[in-house]
Image: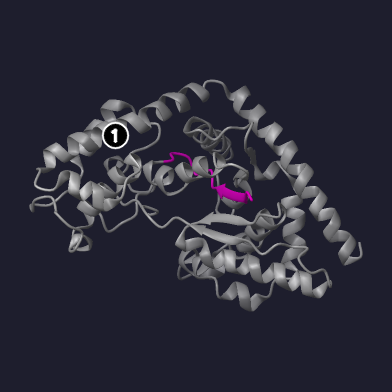
Amino acid sequence: MGKKIFSGVQPTGNLHLGNYIGAIKNFVDLQNQKGNECVYCVVDLHAITTKQDPKILKNNIRETTAAFLASGIDPKKSIIFNQSLVAAHSEGSWILGCIARMGWLNRMTQFKEKAGKDKEKASVGLYIYPVLMTADILLYDSTHVPVGEDQKQHLELARDIAQKFNLDFDSPDFLRAPEPLIQKNFSRIMSLKDGTNKMSKSDPSDLSRINLTDNKDQIVNKIKKAKTDNDPLPDDNKNLSKRPEVENLLGIYSSLSDQSLKNSINEFSGKNFSQFKEKLTEIVVEKISPISIEINKLLKDIDYIDTVLKEGGKRADLIASKKVLEMKKLIGF
């Protein structure tokens, strides 16, 4: 039996290789598995938990959608939409916010990390963000949610809220408690300049990441300059954790080649870094260049992107608004 998948990506713009390997590549694989129903959302409501420039936000929503499409997410097979098009997300979030408990939200470590020392100045939206994420997931009767380790706690909260709603309104199994889909391998791609830090668009050095909009020459240059170390390539993975840059580059190669880390180590054992980087460049160019070309092409056709989102929004709304209507009946509205 197929899975019902929901996942969302924040429209931060400038998506990179880490986003592709850690999430989008997996979205495409899930979409193409027989029987799966996939809903992929550009979570623009989540984005405004921190201050946004309206023009940049609008562009980022389109760029994230273009990256979805260019990577192989098919609007005929999956629902692609941006969250703000479907009012049921906000309405469902309010209802579920009345079910959630302060103590549960106080335990969310991501708020503490993002709010920093002065949490009094953080927005209320940032604090209740996990409740909106819960609504996103539960309104589609999702059975599985692809999440990174950093979002696993939020999914546990979604399960708790679902169970409490069902109990409070004597409606067993009305809200489905979803299971996490945690990518075991290559879920965290690190910076090309520092293997101990995650690849990030906020890194001031553009050489630290491969953007999904980079052209072939930029990719070649970035891999050429990617940090390694002075030791030869390993012949096993015994001490690989002590060589974060090498582990990261081998991980990128393995993921894009659809092979295990062990096989990649065997392939390059005894070879020098220039030979390995040559092969790594080939595979990154082969996989990312077509995506980059397609993103740039799509961004010249804004009407098409907006149509995809609008059509996806209509399909999403049919499902989500129906669920909210059922919730209202149970509540007594």
* View extreme (bottom): residue: 103
Residue type, numbered disc 1: Ile
* Picture quadrant of residue 302: top right
Residue span colored magenta? 1-15
Q: Residue at x 58, y 68 (%)?
A: 156
Q: Residue at x 25, y 53 (%)?
A: 262
Quadrant in the picture for the C terminus: bottom right
199 horizontally vs 39: left or right: left
**How many marks do you count on the picture?**
1
* View extreme (right): residue: 332
* Residue identifier under label 1: 283
124 horizontally vs 231: left or right: right
* Picture quadrant of residue 289: top left
Q: Position of residue 83 (x, y in %)?
A: 66, 45
Camera-side residue of 174 and 246: 174
Is-magenta flag for residue 179?
no
- Residue 326 position (above or below residue 208): below
Q: Residues within 10 Å of mark 1 (few under 14, many from 20)?
A: some
Q: Position of residue 158 (x, y in %)?
A: 64, 65
Q: How is the image coloured?
A: one colour
Indicate the secondary structure of the residue bearing disc 1: helix
Q: Is residue 194 visible?
A: no
- Residue 238 position (above or below residue 230): below
- Residue 62 position (above or below residue 164): above
Q: Is residue 120 visible?
A: yes
Q: Residue at x 61, y 50 (%)?
A: 5
Q: Position of residue 48 (x, y in %)?
A: 59, 50
Q: Predominant secondary structure in magenta?
A: loop
Q: Residue at x 14, y 54 (%)?
A: 235
Q: Position of residue 313 (x, y in %)?
A: 71, 38
Is-magenta flag for residue 2?
yes
